[in-house]
């Protein structure tokens, strides 16, 4: 059986909350992120 992929559009800067909500609903999700070192 092949798994289907779906794209979810979110508001700006709401990606992590949407990811957490999907996990809470027991929906497998993938959230690629990058770490950046910022020096002010």
Image (cartoon, helix red, strand yellow):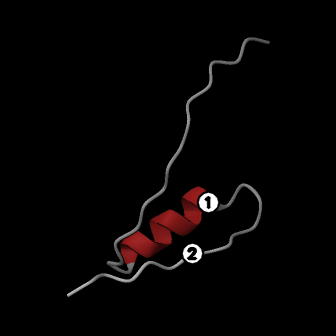
Query: In the displayed structure, would residue 4 be above or below residue 40?
Result: below
Front-most of 1 and 29? 1
Residue at x 46%, y 64% (from the top left corner): 20
On the image, the x and y values in percent for residue 28 come to 34, 72
**Residue matched to label 2:** 7
Q: Residue furthest front?
A: 2
How far apart are the alpha carbons under marks 1 and 2?
12 Å
**Position of residue 3 in the picture relative to residue 36 (left or right):** left
Q: Position of residue 23 (x, y in %)?
A: 38, 70
Q: Measuring 60% from the left and 75% from the top, which residue is drawn there?
A: 8
**Could you tell me which residue is drawn at 26 percent across and 84 percent down?**
2
Q: Which of 35 and 16 is in front in this view?
A: 35
**Which image quadrant: the N terminus?**
bottom left
User: Based on the displayed image, in which of its 4 quarters is residue 39 positioned?
Assistant: top right
Helix, strand or loop at disc 2? loop
In the picture of the structure, the residue carrying the numbered disc 1 is 15
20 relative to 25 in the view: left or right: right
Say which of marks 1 and 2 sits in front. Answer: 2
Q: How crowded is mark 1: few (under 14 residues within 10 Å), some or many (20 or more)?
A: some
Image spot of residue 7 (x, y percent): 57, 75
Name the image quarter holding the C terminus: top right
Closer to the chain start, of discs 1 and 2, is 2
Q: Which residue lies furthest to the bottom in this view?
A: 1
Q: Looking at the image, do the residues carrying marks 1 and 2 touch, with CB atoms under 8 Å apart?
A: no
Taking depth in this image into account, of 16 and 32 the one nearest to the observer is: 32
Residue 13, compared with residue 38, is above or below; it is: below
Q: Residue 29 carries which label?
A: none
Q: Is 40 placed above or below 16 here?
A: above
Please report the residue visible at 36 percent of the width from the left and 78 percent of the height from the top: 27
């Amino acid at each position: 059986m092949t798994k289907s992929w779906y794209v979810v559009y979110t508001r700006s800067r709401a990606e992590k909350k949407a990811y957490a909500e999907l996990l809470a609903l027991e929906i497998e999700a993938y959230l690629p992120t990058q770490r950046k070192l910022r020096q002010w």
